[in-house]
Image: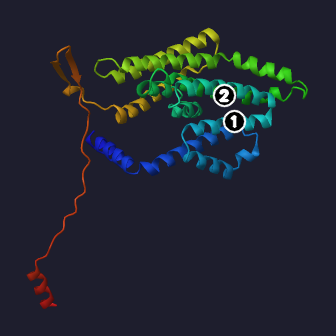
Amino acid sequence: MTSLLVFREQLKKFYGKYELYITPVFKFLLALMTLIMINSSIGYMSELKNIAVVLVLALMCSFLPMNFIVVMAAAVTLGHLYKFSLECAVVALAVFLLLFILYFRFSPKDTIAVLLTPLCFMLKIPYVMPIAMGLVGTPVSAISVASGTVVYYTIKYMTDSASVLSTFEEDGALEKFRYVIDGMLGNTAMFVTIAAFVATLIVVYLIRRLNVDYAWTIAMITGALLDVLVLLFGDLMYSTNSSILGVIVGSVVSVLLAKILEFFAFNVDYSRTEFVQFEDDEYYYYVKAVPKNTVSAPQKRVKTIRVPEKAVRQQKRDR
């Protein structure tokens, strides 16, 4: 355990020292993964799939605010959909505009949640996002997680419907609009997942703020169980075709990843908890103080050994 704490302190010290360089690299990698995911899912426009274009766009995102990555990802998505079907692009544009209004109004600082949620869906571990954002975010972060969920299901639905949409006649724009909109509104799996994620995030947030020992661990386990129950109940009610084994395994992996997050964000020693009581002219104060698990990183020391001048002279004489 001590070695892990030392590693954490060294990592924090390294990041603090090179933050100016690490942050652009992180944004570059995040933008690169996002664009690659979009191109692999709906790569209809070959120009946007060009590796040089992807690298240039990711490089631009690395020097601009984080929210620019969201805007760039939406633009690339719309470009691919426009190449495939104008009707799909228009519907996606309307969905993105609605999400942008909600996102920029209530949770503009949760860019990481909007981007990582679709990525986690691709990796089959989306259940980590509501738990993680419940631990480090606020209830408003549910908007960001829900937005990322809508983006994933929108792309997935339009990709799965490509074969059907291609059978419509060229002048059947109205039928295409109706098919896409009805499919989006009738996507029960998306709405059940959003409900499960929002409920999980809020419950995790409320529990981790309780004045109890191991509140974060209790919040993780409770949130994972609630997520599983809502998803399975939704599957029974609306036939969302959710994989029971996939949900359970994904939730277990999500709890383990959340424990890693806890180690870096909230690592405390409950065995050394102290209760302090004091007062002023108007109030009595009862304070519970829980110390953090910290350890000072070992410092490298350079020891200089000086040889006496007499010994140096004697060595020269011997030579």
- Image location of residue 164, percent across then percent down: 81, 26
Q: Which mark is residue 231?
A: none
- Residue at x 82% of width, y 23% of height: 176
**From this viewpoint, is residue 161 visible?**
no
Disc 2 designates what residue?
Answer: 96
- Residue at x 63% of width, y 50% of height: 55
Q: Nearer the viewer, mark 1 or mark 2?
A: 2
Quick check: 211 left or right of 178?
left
Local SS, label 1 = helix
Quick check: 277 left or right of 245?
left
Name the amino acid type tagged 2.
Phe
User: 315 above or below 303?
Assistant: below
> Residue 264's image quarter?
top left
Local SS, label 2 = helix
CB atoms of marks 1 and 2 within 8 Å: yes
Disc 1 designates what residue?
Answer: 77
